[in-house]
Image (cartoon, grey):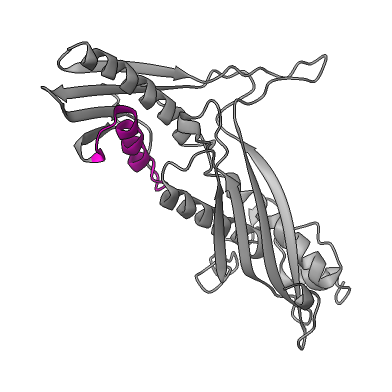
Amino acid sequence: KKEERGKKKEAIVRGQGFAAGFKNVGFSFGYQENCWAKVEIYGNGKIEKVILHHAGAEVGQGTHTVMVQMAAQALNVSTEIIDLRVSDSATQENPGSASASRLTFMAGNSIKGAAELALQKWNNEERPAVAEFKYLAPRTTPMDKETGFSTPNFQYAWVAQACEVEVDTETGHVKVTRILSADDVGKAINPDLIVGQIEGAIVQAHGYAVLEDFKTKDGKVLTDQFSNYLLPTILDIPEKVESVLVEIPDPNGPWGARGVGELPYLPVAPVIAAAIHDATGVWIDEFPFTPERVLRALGKIK
């Protein structure tokens, strides 16, 4: 609350912060992004079974669930009849990596293309109707050495965050009590999975912004134990993490979707820094915001 900003309760001061950012999707600066999919449709008078071949990696983000949803959407069938065959290098082409927030965009466009081609064959009485499709993302260009200009990326996503913190001016401890993230996802193919990714990104970023102090000396890692390289536990993360899904469709995204996996990670350190400044009146330009750094910024230690 505004009236609580900077208010002292014993040694605790409170503040609010705001930060925004953007993130590219996919590989860029001239690399031709591509992704492959294959769809097989089986049945007689109606579609009874669909086999979807795609090698996109599932690393916990829910990619395989979304792939099935997108195939069902493209074919106007139930997800119950989609049989997803994944990661078979003997029969499938390279889908690209699970990185750069790219899989929903790239896999979605490849699956959509293969499904539409297979559906055309189905409507032309081919049984089974089988189609492959390699999606090529819009072209990007390297930076021109003479002009400094380029078309570096084919898609962007945007995020804005606000947070509330409590700073103990005696101990230097920073506690993030609430953080809200508004992310432009283009089109939420699976809202629950997106919220999960946003929450996971915020918790991870909160760790590096407040706790994870990686120290080295003479080429050796000093913080090489969980006792001195602190990861956030359930007791350390913000008490409230809230998500707002903004849906402004991307013209090149499958059904307008944008990549979102890494996006919420970006503004967390800046938004906490802004809230600390609001609470204490000092800017801290180095993180993690450890008690030592906070107390030094407040002039209480050298």
Above or below for 222 versus 28 = below
| Residue placed most toward the observer, 45 or 136 | 45
Residue for point 23% across, 35% down: 82
Quarter of the picture holding the C terminus: bottom right
Taking the image as shown, residue 169 lies to the left or right of residue 54, namely right
Residue 294 pos. (x, y %): 78, 70
Picture quarter containing residue 71?
top left
Residue 59 pos. (x, y %): 40, 44
Residue 217 visible, this angle: no
| Residue placed most toward the observer, 273 or 79 | 79
| Residue placed most toward the observer, 101 or 158 | 158
Q: Which segment is the magenta one?
A: 59-79
Residue for point 29% across, 31% down: 76
Residue 80 magenta: no
Above or below for 296 versus 75 = below
Residue 64 visible, this angle: yes
Residue for point 86% across, 77% down: 300
Residue for point 31% across, 23% down: 115
